[in-house]
Amino acid sequence: MSPAEHTTETTPRRRSLVLALPLIIFAAIAALFYFGLIAGDPSKLPSALIGKQVPPTDLPPLEALAINGKPVPGLKDDMLKGHVTLVNVWASWCVPCHDEAPLLDALAKDKRFNIVGINYKDVADNARRFLNRYGNPFTAVGVDEKGRASIDWGVYGVPETFLIGRDGRIAYKLVGPITPQNIEAVLKPQIEKALQQP
């Protein structure tokens, strides 16, 4: 085989490989996303804040939100000490938040702990409509308009729920929506455990 014949044979093979390479890379990246995001359990994402004091938080109230004519306050970190508290990060535009809202409302009937909300990157009118539609389980709602406070809390996305012990430390973090399954299997046992702590 002459050098010219060898070159013409290998050139199409190289060209095929060069053309196939982007497809191979894309398939590898797609597989990583699938197994990391879809097949993986987002509730198993680790939180560096477990066992640590809640981050400094000073969020303004949701404008014109009231319970029995009394304005609902914003959220400050000193509100999260001295009692067990669930902190729910939510938004009216978040589809799973609509599904978990009735469950939060049912949880709010248990007066042994408080439920407060961080309203994440939302429009005030939409957030108020959301709470009027489903009921307001929150004793306080802080508005995180830019999402900065949620970053400090280590939020991956909405909804997320944090359990805070009486000592002001984060005892548990639930990534994703509250569901009938995880409320019974995980969240209520974690709340009971926190209530037994001094």
Image: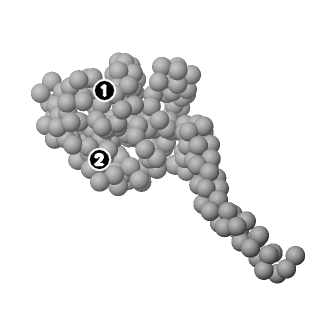
Question: Relative to residue 152, is residue 43 drawn left or right?
Answer: right
Front residue (pair 175, 12): 12
Front residue (pair 183, 168): 183
The residue at the point 39 percent across, 31 percent down is 96
Q: Splitting the image into 4 quarters, where does residue 89 fall?
A: top left
The kind of residue tagged 1 is: Pro
As displayed, is residue 146 above or below residue 124? below
**Around disc 2, counting alpha carbons within 10 Å, would you say few (fewer than 14), some (14 to 19), or many (20 or more)?**
some
- Please state the horizontal and vertical placement of residue 16, each as a whole percent of the image: 67, 62
As displayed, is residue 113 above or below residue 166? above
As displayed, is residue 187 above or below residue 122? above
User: Pointer 1: what residue?
Assistant: 137
Label at residue 35:
none
Question: Relative to residue 119, is residue 187 drawn left or right?
Answer: right
- Please state the horizontal and vertical placement of residue 18, each as a whole percent of the image: 65, 66
Q: CA distance from mark 2 to mark 1?
A: 19 Å
Q: Secondary structure at mark 2?
A: loop
As displayed, is residue 75 above or below residue 96? below
User: Pointer 2: what residue?
Assistant: 121
User: Looking at the image, which residue sits at the far right?
Assistant: 1
The residue at the point 69 percent across, 63 percent down is 17
Front residue (pair 185, 164): 185
- Please state the horizontal and vertical placement of residue 189, each as a whole percent of the image: 55, 24
Q: Secondary structure at mark 1?
A: loop
Whether residue 129 can be seen here: yes
- Asked if labels 1 and 2 touch by Cβ distance under 8 angstroms, the answer is no
Whether residue 164 can be seen here: no
Q: Quadrant of the N terminus?
A: bottom right
The kind of residue tagged 2 is: Lys
